[in-house]
Image: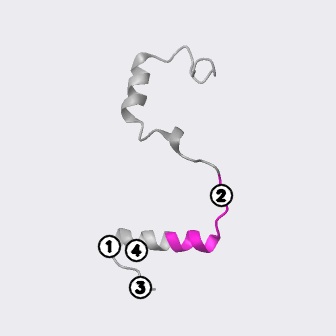
Amino acid sequence: MMIEEQLVTDAASDDHVGHLYGRWQMPLYALDMKAKAVERSALEAEQERMLWAEMGVANEH
């Protein structure tokens, strides 16, 4: 499939395939990658929540 879609060149080797296979984080084909509308305030609130969680502090604000 990748060859038919011209996503790889003739320079690609089995070693390249091994690196991709061994280092790929997760299969993305199962994820819904469509954009969705989200309020900016919701994004900022989530960012704040994640910051506090990273610091190990409960956000009481």
Q: Is residue 28 above or below residue 35?
A: above
Find numbered disc 1 in the image and state the secondary structure of the residue it sits on. loop
In the rendered image, residue 11, in percent from the top left (x then y), is placed at 52, 15
Callout 4, which amino acid?
Answer: Trp
Callout 2, which amino acid?
Answer: Lys
Q: Which mark is residue 56?
A: 1
Task: Tell me the quarter of the picture where residue 55 sits.
Answer: bottom left
Answer whether residue 41 is magenta in the image.
Answer: yes
Mark nearer the viewer, 2 or 3: 2
The residue where tag 3 is placed is 60
Tell me, yes or no, whether the two marked residues, 4 and 2, touch with CB atoms within 8 Å: no
Quadrant the N terminus occupies: top right
Judged from this view, the residue extending furthest toward the left is: 56
The residue where tag 4 is placed is 52
Tell me, yes or no, whether the two marked residues, 2 and 1, touch with CB atoms within 8 Å: no
In the rendered image, residue 2, in percent from the top left (x then y), is placed at 57, 22
Answer whether residue 54 is magenta in the image.
Answer: no
